[in-house]
């Protein structure tokens, strides 16, 4: 078999970043504005502002010290945002413009842990890790109060909703609530009822009642006037936040009377454990409250008077769904909940119906795929049991739950509606996306005895899929006919998948499986440094590809030739012939493991990604690396190309997903247009010189950014006796940017003794007619002067030596004494 022949498709030359999905929330406080249009959240050193409608990050606010943000708060009037950093600085922002209007020291001796505005948006309270509570006047810019007495970190501060009462409440590490009087500058009461950290404080509309929640599994109703607990409600779960609901009926929340009701965000400890039987299919399930990874957060509505739970949210499937924060935007009718997976969930406040989901942080992205017949969506598998589906046009996000451990790999079927996932929980799932873009799990299967690390779908028809596991086996799973019918719906729950064939293929972990375009061959790549070729559907061994020095991470069939590509931890990519299992080509260029490889340009080029964070484009015919794309900061685990071969998708350990666009045709068109424009300008320049229109000629030459062409124009002006006098006027009439360019060109000309006179003429004009202050304002003037001085001094010395030699010659000429020549004999006229 010969080498792969370049197809009729054009070669790609470059990709550009079309879109980047980055983390915008890494834990900490989250806040909705009063209108429910903007969402504020902490992401390391920044506070990100999201547009709730589109999910896009509108602005990122970062303090000048570039330290981590420890606390922030938005004023009730939505006008002022204040942030606190680990550098003990407070910044006041005009957040719509992204400008800091004031920056001052927090005076706390340790970082600020919490802050809150008063109802008038004029006072700000800060609680520090030093146990102090300070109050600031935001309008007049000074500190008004300093309260001491709280032991440990003050993690909670809240103003009373009635500004006339001037009351401030705080809670610290001792699980007590302190009431402070701003008028008397003293502590009014220390309220004790909790036995663990207090997590939230909220007030009734009339200000007479306060509700506190804690991790001691109780909520306490307080009388603000007497500072006494009037009711203790056991909620039987750790509560991270509690919200008092408006005193009005809400049937959707189970609120049928006008009494005091509140909503809690907590966790329920449930754990699903699987025990696999001898045949690998049986699974027994029991429930326990032991595993913190499996906590599932719930929203509950309680009636304060009776202590009864009147409404419980439907349990979210999957582990790690415990809620860490909850807030109510009453005016917008929205309820915000935050999960431990850094997912932000927006509910309708009247019915707890989920309206929007935002994936704040994906941790390490392990795999990515395009979805839909037109690649309108992407699915992301990260270091989490849940999958995230993004609509590319609107950034709308869906969070899919089905696995109980980290999802390791993805693949999509030919039409784009069905895709499959496999995980550490030894299971696989098949998902279907409908025409509205909603995704649901339609089939599940299990049978492997260890983590399932790779999965591949059939290529010709949606008939089967193949999985590879750490148990060194490969399984072939037929797709049930029920999933392929148009009317099939997952109303009855996921269909059970059963393996058709199981084959032990390698001696170590299987890292990659690939199905040939004709669905008749299977390739496997393993940590044992070999790839193998198998005949489907019975998995009969056809041959072994040996040659890599380390384990294989990826195998991929060519779409057009009988060739297999393998990517290895030895940093190389190899192409193998399927007929005789020989190595055709080896591509070297990555500095670390090559994790993924894909064929593009109809099988004539390769895209590869590696542990070095690079994505490389290779041309197979000449083994050349055409382009290296450097946009990730960690291992690039995921790589997938679109159906039209015009876009690529990558996901990496830096939690970023990047959509790349093929810009080869665009760049070639731009280059062609640029060449044509230069030809037209060159012709116009020749015409202007011929017509002696030197000012326009000089400006045009400068716009071409060609020093030699500008020099030609200057020389033409200096050769013309009439125009030479107008050189000064011509140069001085140029725009400032043109003068700056001319000065840069002079630096180049001055390095050559043949052109130095032209450079010195132009310099002389600029120095005589431009003020020194204006010249110094030119960007790069310092560097230009440093480059001009040594060559100018050298030219001056050369001219000085020439002048001395000419003076000496003149002296010799005037002092030379020539001997008197003998007079010629005169001839008599008669002799003529």
Image (spheres, rainbow, N blue to C red):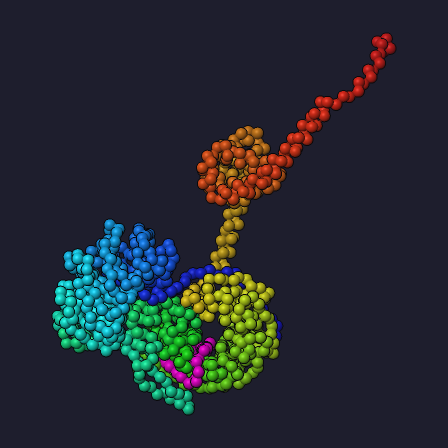
**Residue at (61%, 41%) from the top-left corner?**
752
Residue at the (55%, 78%) spot, across then down: 529
Q: Which residue is at the front of the view, 73 or 645?
A: 73
Residue sitting farthest toward the right: 831
Residue 278 position (above or below residue 188): below
**How far from the left and from the top, in percent, is residue 404?**
36, 79
**Is residue 408 found inside the magenta-colored segment of the image?**
no
Closer to us: 168 or 555: 168
Image quadrant occupied by the N terminus = bottom right
Position of the C terminus, as image quadrant, is top right
User: Range of the magenta residues?
Assistant: 440-464
Residue 274: percent from the left, percent from the top? Answer: 37, 85
Residue at the image position 19 percent from the left and 62 percent from the top: 187
Q: Which x, y percent locates residue 250? A: 17, 70
> Is 414 placed left or right of 436 in the picture?
right
> How far from the left and from the top, in percent, is residue 158?
22, 62
* Residue at the (30%, 63%) spot, across then down: 129
Q: Relative to residue 811, is residue 389 drawn left or right?
A: left
Q: Is 47 rendered above or below residue 380?
A: above
């Amino acid at each position: 078999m010969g080498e792969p022949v370049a197809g009729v498709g054009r070669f790609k030359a470059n990709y550009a970043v079309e879109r980047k999905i980055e983390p915008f929330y890494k834990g900490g406080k989250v806040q909705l504005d009063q209108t429910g249009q903007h969402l504020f959240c902490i992401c390391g050193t920044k506070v990100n502002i999201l547009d709730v409608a589109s999910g896009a990050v509108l602005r990122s606010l970062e303090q000048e010290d570039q330290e981590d943000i420890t606390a922030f708060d938005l004023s009730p009037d939505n006008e002022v945002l204040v942030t606190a950093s680990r550098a003990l600085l407070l910044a006041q922002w005009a957040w719509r413009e992204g400008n800091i209007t004031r920056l001052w020291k927090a005076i706390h001796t340790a970082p600020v842990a919490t802050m809150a505005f008063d109802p008038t948006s004029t006072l700000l309270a800060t609680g520090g890790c030093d146990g102090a509570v300070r109050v600031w006047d935001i309008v007049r810019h000074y500190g008004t109060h300093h309260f001491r007495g709280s032991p440990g970190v003050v993690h909670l501060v809240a103003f009373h909703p009635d500004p006339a009462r001037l009351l401030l409440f705080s809670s610290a590490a001792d699980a007590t609530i302190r009431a402070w009087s701003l008028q008397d500058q003293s502590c009014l009461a220390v309220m004790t009822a909790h036995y663990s950290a207090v997590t939230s404080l909220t007030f009734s509309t009339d200000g007479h009642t306060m509700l506190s929640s804690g991790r001691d599994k109780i909520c306490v109703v307080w009388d603000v006037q007497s500072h006494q607990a009037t009711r203790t409600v056991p909620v039987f779960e750790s509560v991270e936040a509690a919200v008092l609901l408006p005193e009005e009926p809400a049937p959707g929340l189970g609120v049928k009377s006008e009494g005091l009701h509140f909503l809690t965000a907590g966790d329920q400890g449930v754990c699903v454990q699987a025990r696999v039987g001898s045949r690998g299919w049986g699974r027994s399930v029991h429930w326990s409250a032991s595993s913190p990874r499996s906590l599932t957060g719930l929203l509950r509505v309680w009636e304060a008077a009776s202590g009864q739970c009147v409404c419980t949210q439907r349990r979210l499937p999957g582990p790690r769904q415990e809620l860490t924060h909850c807030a109510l935007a009453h005016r917008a009718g929205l309820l915000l909940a935050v999960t431990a997976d850094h997912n932000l969930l927006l509910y309708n406040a009247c019915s707890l119906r989920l309206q929007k989901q935002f994936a704040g942080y994906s941790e390490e992205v392990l795999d990515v795929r395009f979805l839909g017949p037109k690649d309108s969506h992407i699915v992301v598998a990260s270091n989490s049991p849940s999958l995230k589906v993004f609509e590319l046009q609107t950034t709308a996000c869906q969070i899919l739950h089905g696995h109980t451990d980290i999802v390791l790999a993805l693949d999509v079927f030919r039409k784009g509606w069905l895709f499959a996932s496999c995980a550490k929980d030894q299971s696989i799932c098949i998902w279907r996306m409908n025409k509205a873009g909603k995704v649901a799990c339609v089939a599940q299967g299990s049978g492997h005895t260890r983590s399932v690390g790779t999965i591949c779908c059939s290529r010709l028809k949606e008939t089967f899929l193949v999985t590879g596991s750490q148990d060194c086996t490969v399984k072939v799973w037929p797709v049930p006919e029920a999933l392929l019918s148009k009317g099939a719906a997952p109303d009855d729950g996921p269909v059970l998948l059963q393996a058709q064939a199981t084959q032990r293929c390698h001696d170590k972990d299987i890292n990659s499986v690939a199905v040939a375009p004709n669905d008749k061959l299977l390739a496997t790549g393993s940590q044992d440094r070999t790839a193998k070729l198998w005949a489907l559907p019975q998995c009969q061994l056809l041959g072994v590809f040996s040659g890599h020095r380390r384990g294989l991470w990826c195998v991929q069939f060519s779409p057009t030739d009988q060739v297999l590509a393998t990517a290895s931890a030895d940093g190389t990519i190899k192409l193998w012939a399927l007929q005789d299992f020989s190595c055709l080509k080896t591509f070297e260029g990555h500095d670390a493991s090559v994790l993924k490889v894909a064929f593009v340009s109809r099988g004539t080029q390769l895209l590869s990604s590696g542990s070095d964070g690079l994505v490389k484009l290779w041309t197979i015919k000449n083994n050349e690396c055409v382009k290296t794309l450097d946009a990730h900061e960690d291992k690039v685990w995921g790589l997938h190309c679109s159906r039209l071969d015009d876009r690529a998708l990558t996901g990496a350990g830096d939690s970023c997903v990047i959509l790349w666009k093929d810009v080869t045709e665009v760049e070639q068109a731009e280059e062609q247009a640029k060449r044509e424009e230069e030809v037209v300008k060159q012709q116009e320049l020749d015409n202007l010189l011929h017509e002696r229109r030197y000012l326009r000629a000089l400006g045009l030459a400068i716009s071409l950014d060609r020093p030699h062409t500008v020099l030609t124009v200057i020389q033409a002006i200096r050769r013309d006796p009439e125009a030479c006098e107008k050189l000064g006027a011509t140069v001085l009439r140029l725009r400032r940017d043109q003068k700056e360019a001319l000065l840069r060109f002079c630096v180049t000309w001055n390095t050559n003794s043949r052109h130095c006179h032209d450079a010195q003429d132009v310099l002389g004009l600029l120095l005589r007619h431009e003020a020194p202050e204006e010249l110094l304002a030119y960007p790069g003037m310092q560097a230009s002067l440093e480059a001009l001085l040594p060559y100018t001094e050298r030219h001056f010395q050369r001219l000085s030596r020439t002048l001395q030699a000419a003076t000496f010659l003149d002296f010799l000429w005037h002092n030379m004494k020539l001997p008197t020549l003998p007079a010629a004999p005169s001839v008599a006229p008669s002799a003529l």
